[in-house]
Image (tube, rainbow, N blue to C red):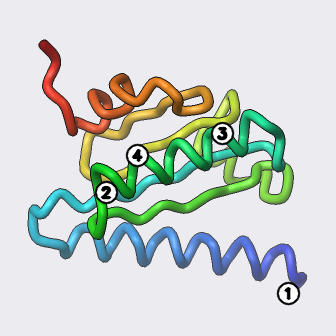
């Protein structure tokens, strides 16, 4: 098995394990998030910083964040149907949601994550 194939298999297993762990959690509002970026461009860096900030301020201790560089692992972009980057995907809790951009519109992200109610 090639290293690339082994890495992809391991990443898929990690994603499966995270999903199963989230399913077994009590309804404490555990979040499974994936952030797809394209290398370390300024936009990707901002998206990573903004996403981490949102998670630490609003989801501390009840989230898993996986950052996926689609230049290094393009198979995940195809499987996740990612058409633009950066893209944040909320896998759990349902419903699945996708956010495109540098995640600087915090209120919009919080609404989409169901952490704020729409006025």
Mark-to-mark CA distance, 2 and 1: 33 Å
Where in the figure is residue 16, as x and y percent of width and height? Answer: 45, 72
Mark-to-mark CA distance, 4 and 2: 12 Å
Mark-to-mark CA distance, 3 and 1: 36 Å
Q: Is residue 46 left or right of residue 34?
A: right
Where in the figure is residue 118, as x and y percent of width and height? Answer: 16, 18
Where in the figure is residue 22, as x and y percent of width and height? Answer: 28, 68
Mark 4 Cα-neighbour bin, 10 Å: few <14, some 14–19, many ≥20? some
Local secondary structure at mark 1: loop
Q: Is residue 2 left or right of residue 32?
A: right
Mark 3 Cα-neighbour bin, 10 Å: few <14, some 14–19, many ≥20? some
The numbered mark, 2 or 3, whose residue comes first in the sequence reads 2
Residue placed under numbered mark 2 in the picture: 31
- Foreground mark, 3 or 1, reads 3
- Foreground mark, 4 or 1, reads 4
Residue located at (73% from left, 34% from top): 43
Residue located at (12% from left, 12% from top): 119
Mark-to-mark CA distance, 4 and 1: 38 Å
Please tell me whether residue 7 is drawn above or below residue 93 in the rendered image.
below
Q: Are marks 2 and 1 in contact (CB under 8 Å)?
A: no
Q: Which mark is residue 46?
A: 3
Residue placed under numbered mark 1 in the picture: 1
């Amino acid at each position: 098995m090639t290293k690339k194939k082994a890495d992809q298999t391991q990443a898929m297993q990690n994603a499966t394990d995270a999903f199963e762990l989230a399913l077994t959690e009590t309804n404490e509002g555990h979040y499974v998030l994936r952030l797809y970026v394209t290398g370390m461009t300024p936009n990707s860096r901002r998206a990573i910083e903004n996403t981490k900030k949102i998670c630490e301020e609003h989801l501390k201790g009840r989230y898993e964040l996986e950052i996926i560089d689609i230049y290094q692992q393009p198979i995940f972009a195809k499987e996740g149907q990612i058409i633009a980057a950066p893209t944040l995907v909320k896998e759990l809790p349902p419903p699945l949601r996708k956010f495109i951009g540098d995640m600087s519109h915090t209120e919009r992200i919080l609404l989409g994550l169901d952490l704020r109610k729409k006025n």
